[in-house]
Amino acid sequence: WAQAFSCFATWIPACAFAEALCLASKPEGVVRLNLPRIVLDLFFQRYFAPFKNEYPDIKLELFTTDRKVNIIDSGFDAGIRYTQDVPKDMIAIPFGEPLSLIPVASADFIKKSGAPSSPKDLVNFRCINRCFPDGDLYRWEFISATGVITEVAVKGDLVMDSDAAMIQAAESGLGIAFVYENLVQDKIKEGGLVRLLSDYHYPADHFNIYYPSRKHIPVPLRTFITWVMSMNKNILQQ
């Protein structure tokens, strides 16, 4: 994460940027954001809802798609994407903490089918495939305790592009799902799902909010960016 903070400092001089913001006492206007739907599942209650409560006069328009979109041509003020998907000519700041995916299954599934002992062993189990917007299937990624990265093309008779649906399918005993850890922590604690391959980890990354480099940033967008920087303050200092 220290490396991410270094990149952040390179992308935008945060302190100077924040000091330059001179916001109205009650800013108003519209902020149009393009973002993957998973961002709403992960961050709506933590970021978007509190922002709306604090700035009720700013209209927040959230358009979700997992396809890559040119935010300028499509009329958006900003976008939210993973680091590697942010266009190089954009200003970007981290949006939330690094996120990890983990494999989970129901206790009943494990009782009937057993549990994998290594990532490569997943090919012998019924898994719930994750697909990209272009139809390609995601290869599950793992990092061992020694730093070895493994990619696995899992098999299964169910393909989805929604984490919420994958979680429901796993709870129903339809296979092993590879989903965002934040979304299943409570279900694991309650016993509804079981984490598998706990000795392996996912190469975590964080989302970024990005926007065009321009001298005059609209007040509603500046307000939202400042809000994100404030929410990220403790994370960025880690």
Image (cartoon, rainbow, N blue to C red):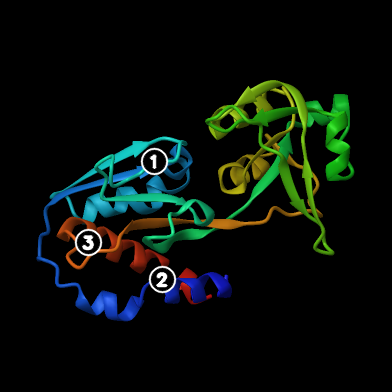
Residue at the (38%, 64%) spot, across then down: 231
Q: Which mark is residue 11?
A: 2
| Helix, strand or loop at mark 2 | helix
Give the number of the mark in front: 3 or 1. 1
Relative to 20, residue 45 above or below: above
167, 225: nearer the viewer = 225
Alpha-carbon span between mark 3 and mark 1: 23 Å
Q: Which residue is mark 1?
A: 69
Rendered residue at 10%/65% (across/down): 24
Q: Amino acid at mark 1?
A: Val
List x then y, in percent, for residue 49. 31, 48
Q: Is residue 188 left or right of residue 74?
A: right
Query: Where is residue 173, by image quadrant?
Result: top right
- When the figure is inspected, residue 47 is found, relative to residue 127, above or below; the finding is below
Spot occupied by residue 206 in the image (x, y as percentages of width and height): 52, 57
Please provide percent x and percent y for residue 77.
25, 50
Q: Going from the N terminus, do you reach mark 3 or mark 1 first?
A: 1
- Report the residue at 72% width, 47% height from top: 141
Secondary structure found at label 3: helix
Q: Is residue 92 left or right of residue 31?
A: right
Question: In the image, what residue occupies the spot 64% across and 23% down?
Answer: 159
Verify CB contact (< 8 Å) between mark 3 and mark 2: no
Indicate the amino acid at tag 3: Thr
Q: Position of residue 221 (x, y in %)?
A: 23, 57
**Mark number, residue 223:** 3
Mark 1 is surrounded, within 10 Å at the Cα level, by few (under 14), some (14 to 19) or many (20 or more) other residues, namely few
